Image (cartoon, rainbow, N blue to C red):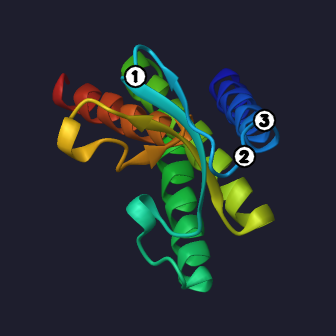
Amino acid sequence: MFWFVLAILLCAVELGIKAWVRRSLSDTEDKDILNNKVTLTKRSNEGLAMGLFKGNPRKVLGLTLIGLGVVLGLFYMATGKKGNFLMKAGATLALGGAMSNAYERIMDGSVTDYFKINLFKNKKGRIVFNIADYMIFCGTLLALVSRKSK
């Protein structure tokens, strides 16, 4: 139960951040943070990662719900066993991020992305993402690492 409540809390915090970004930034406004290494911006992503399937909302929603179901199943399997803290933490992060993005996509038809990483001069600001994306990525990595360490 602890892990599920934590996933819901992570989801709620991320939804709150997304709401703040939508309220506080205009569509053309960028705020440089961390010595211009990261830019806070506001982008509405109607597609999947990197805009994949943009313009096909039914496919995007279907794939989002399938992905959420897979993550929820993995979460249930991971947290239903004793031990393996890394697997549980990873599954919790991934579920919190997946729930946040799925909720926003169901309610708004798009996901709010708000971070750009500006580390490479020739590719400045090409990828815009949100904390939920990062939670899904890091949670998946944690879960994979925990499987390898067994």
Secondary structure at badge 2 equals: loop
Residue drawn at x 47%, y 21% is 82
Q: Which residue is mark 3?
A: 24
Q: Position of residue 17 (x, y in %)?
A: 71, 32
- In the picture, the disc for residue 65 is none
- Nearest the eye: 114 or 108: 114
Q: Which residue is mark 1?
A: 36
Q: Position of residue 53 (x, y in %)?
A: 45, 78
Query: What whole-number distance in Å separates the C-alpha atoms at marks 1 and 2?
Result: 19 Å
Q: Are marks 1 and 2 in contact (CB under 8 Å)?
A: no
What residue type is disc 2 on?
Answer: Ser
Query: What whole-number distance in Å separates the C-alpha atoms at marks 1 and 3?
Result: 19 Å
Q: Position of residue 47 (x, y in %)?
A: 51, 69
Q: Position of residue 37 (x, y in %)?
A: 36, 23
Q: Which residue is mark 2?
A: 26
Do we see residue 131 in this rendering? yes
Question: Does residue 107 appear to the left or right of 99 in the view shown?
Answer: right
Secondary structure at badge 1 equals: loop
Residue drawn at x 39%, y 60% is 50
Snapshot quadrant of residue 149: top left
Do we see residue 81 in this rendering? no
Q: How many marks?
A: 3
What residue type is disc 3 on?
Answer: Ser
Question: Does residue 112 appear to the left or right of 39 in the view shown?
Answer: right
Residue drawn at x 20%, y 24% is 150
Question: Does residue 42 appear to the left or right of 130 in the view shown?
Answer: right
Secondary structure at badge 3 equals: helix
Residue positioned most to the front: 28
Query: What whole-number distance in Å separates the C-alpha atoms at marks 2 and 3?
Result: 7 Å
How would you rate the neighbour count of disc 1 (Cα within 10 Å): few for under 14, some for 14-19, many for 20 or more?
Answer: few
Q: Are marks 1 and 3 in contact (CB under 8 Å)?
A: no
